[in-house]
Image (spheres, rainbow, N blue to C red):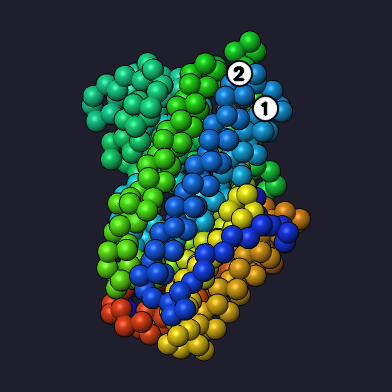
Amino acid sequence: MIRKTVLGAALALFAASAAFTVTPAAAATTSAAVLKHYAALAHAKYEDSLKTAQALDKAIDALIAKPSEETLKAAKDAWIAARVPYQQTEVYRFGNPIVDDWEGKVNAWPLDEGLIDYVDASYGTESDENELYTANVIADPKLKVNGKTLDATKLNAKTLRGLHEAGEIEANVATGYHAIEFLLWGQDLHGTGPGAGERPYTDYDKASCTHGNCDRRAAYLKAASSLLVSDLKDMVAAWAPKGKAAKNVEANSKKGLTAILTGMGSLSYGELAGERMKLGLLLHDPEEEHDCFSDNTYASHLNDAIGIKSAYTGEYVRVDGTKLTGPSLSDLVAAKDRALDGEMKGKLDATLAAMNAMADRAQKVEAYDQMIGENNAEGNAVVQKAIDGLIDQTKTIERVVASLDLGKVELEGSDSLDNPDAVFK
């Protein structure tokens, strides 16, 4: 087993009375059947992500048409709902190059929000690493990128694509969920104190516009929302029965199973336990939380963990309450080593229990950014327990790889876990 070091929700609760659609597994589960079902679940999850993004797009239309406290809240609620199925797809990113190459358009973070819109004075005015740190394209239709003028007179899909990672700077995130999140919530200026972003609805009200450029802000938000819908349509097509991603994963059993376990292990260890959780905990920095404007981070982490378990068990509950099941990696492992299968499921459940405890605290006691704050031993411990669960389940994922004779599998790492001293340099 090789680890590669990489620098770098609403809760998904479903009614017990939900309707169930069961895909029957073959009497003797085959790798081919497992991979076919794995692809089918990806298709269903991206379909749900698309449907909820389309609902978000409609809510944004309503906000722009009639800005008010109510329409802004409805758009925020739609954004939170859209994160639930999408976060459960993230386990498909690692191990599936088609997804990994695409993912940056929809879920890149963290972002230098000064590229997009106005920011508080505390944000600063410049960055040695990013000439567009406070470019504010909403206020300035003419930007200089690498010495060339970028015409942003029209804030449309083409302009946003040109801005995304402009100057080859990853923090110049111009599209996706987090650009939309910033435009709905605004900056969270509370640090590790209570409270999320507090953007006023009047930022979209042309009649009583706050912070200027309300028409351009609305145009940017609509363009970003439309692009999110378009990008998700591409991924739905890729995982359709004859789509490129589905065909790739089903073409070779060993490579396909490796993709599943790479996704589970890399998301568990390097990405979620490391870059998204331990790094922020080490630094006690609210800027390192995933959904930093909305304080929805706890739900995104929880749904990532649900997605990891889904990749193993072959179970997924759709946004309409329908449950999908079928031939799973769990079936293959159980056929070889029932004790190992029990261990894997037990550790996945233990991680979910820790994640749910963290989510419960986030809703009843304090937000995630408060939990990772300095001098908060109790909150820190709640987050650390979820991290420990992710690390522990990764060890069993490695044993599953060995039990299926898949050879060497590279899992994403993180300095925050593998070399913590480097984080402070």
Give the secondary structure at mark 2: helix
First of labels 1, 2 by sequence position:
2
Q: Going 37% across and 79% down the picture, which residue do you hit?
A: 401
Q: Residues within 10 Å of mark 1 (few under 14, many from 20)?
A: some
Check whether the beta carbons of the residues at disc 1 and disc 2 lie within 8 A of each other.
yes
Q: Which mark is residue 65?
A: 2
How many angstroms separate mark 1 from mark 2 (CA)?
Answer: 9 Å
What residue lies at 65% left-to-right and 13% top-to-bottom? 208
Q: Residue 149's quadrant in the figure?
A: top left
Q: Where does label 1 land, which residue?
A: 71
**For residue 409, above or below residue 376:** below
Residue 60 visible in rendering: yes
Q: Amino acid at mark 2?
A: Ala
Left/right placement of residue 143 relative to residue 134 reads left
x%, y% of residue 150? 29, 23
Q: Nearer the viewer, residue 336 or 359?
A: 336
- Measuring 53% from the left and 35% from the top, which residue is drawn there? 54
Tag 1: amino acid: Thr
Q: Nearer the viewer, residue 81 or 135?
A: 81
Q: Single out the residue that lies furthest toward the left.
A: 147
Vertical arrangement, residue 110 with respect to residue 57, above or below: below
Which quadrant of the rendered structure holds the C terminus? Answer: bottom left
Q: Residue 306: horizontal and vertical position, in percent?
A: 56, 63
* Vertical arrangement, residue 402 with respect to residue 190, above or below: below
Q: Is residue 421 visible?
A: no
* Circle number at residue 35: none
Judge left or right: residue 338 versus residue 131: right
**Which percent across, then down, holds residue 350?**
61, 75
